[in-house]
Image (cartoon, helix red, strand yellow):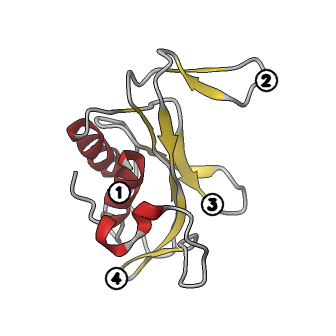
């Protein structure tokens, strides 16, 4: 549930003029309040002519991401949250990521577009989507830590 709350807290800050680096501050704030850490090796990214393109959207605090959101920007937020230390390792298959300390990890992501008055989550579930996550019920959607 922590990774889910981190994602939605970050989405709340998406609007024209917001800085990409501030996403990491919000994600880290929620994670730390819940005794979790934020993986620093991966980040969200822009979606455009190329799939993984600028901007880079780090999910950890004190990152050096540049740029501010503008209407029409399309990007992902996809924090990876660990129950233990933030460090990760990649298996020899070059794809599988695991925590170095063997702790549990979770990751959620959404793709969104910045609108004139905020954000439109393009990958949001709708009323016809199957209910697969019990914590997505309206009474669980608070992003408070």
Earlier in the chain: of badge 1 and badge 2, it is: 1
Expressed as whole percent of the image width and height from the top left, the position of residue 106 reads 49, 41
Q: Which one is nearer the viewer's eye here, 126 or 25?
A: 126
Q: Is residue 113 left or right of residue 60?
A: right
Q: Which one is nearer the viewer's eye here, 94 or 113?
A: 94
Say which of marks 3 and 2 sits in front.
Answer: 2
Q: Disc 4 vs disc 1: Cβ atoms closer than 8 Å?
A: no
Say which of marks 4 and 2 sits in front.
Answer: 2
Task: Answer yes or no: is residue 20 visible.
Answer: no
Q: Pointer 2: what residue?
A: 93
Expressed as whole percent of the image width and height from the top left, the position of residue 64 reads 37, 37
Say which of marks 4 and 1 sits in front.
Answer: 1
Q: Pointer 4: what residue?
A: 117
Task: Give the Cα distance between marks 1 and 3.
Answer: 18 Å
Task: Give the Cα distance between marks 4 and 1.
Answer: 16 Å
Task: Give the Cα distance between marks 4 and 2.
Answer: 43 Å
Label number found at residue 10: 1
Q: Check disc 1 and report its element: helix, strand or loop.
A: helix
Neighbor class of circle 4 (other Cα within 10 Å; few <14, some 14-19, many 20+) is few
User: Which residue lies at the image location 69% right of the left edge and 29% below the top edge?
Assistant: 96
Q: Considering only vertical position in the picture, is 67 above or below 124?
A: above
Q: Check disc 3 and report its element: helix, strand or loop.
A: loop
């Amino acid at each position: 549930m922590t990774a889910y709350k981190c994602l939605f807290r970050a989405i709340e800050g998406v609007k024209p003029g917001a800085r990409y680096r501030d996403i990491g501050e919000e994600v880290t704030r929620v994670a730390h309040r819940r005794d979790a850490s934020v993986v620093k090796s991966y980040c969200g990214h822009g979606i455009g002519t190329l799939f993984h393109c600028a901007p880079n959207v780090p999910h950890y605090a004190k990152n050096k991401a540049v740029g501010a959101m503008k209407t029409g920007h399309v990007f992902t937020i996809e924090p990876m949250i660990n129950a233990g230390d933030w460090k990760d390792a990649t298996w020899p298959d070059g794809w599988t990521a695991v925590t170095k300390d063997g702790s549990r990890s979770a990751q959620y992501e959404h793709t969104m577009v910045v609108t004139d008055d905020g954000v439109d989550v393009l990958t949001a579930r709708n009323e016809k989507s199957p209910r697969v996550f019990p914590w997505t019920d309206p009474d669980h959607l608070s992003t408070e830590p």
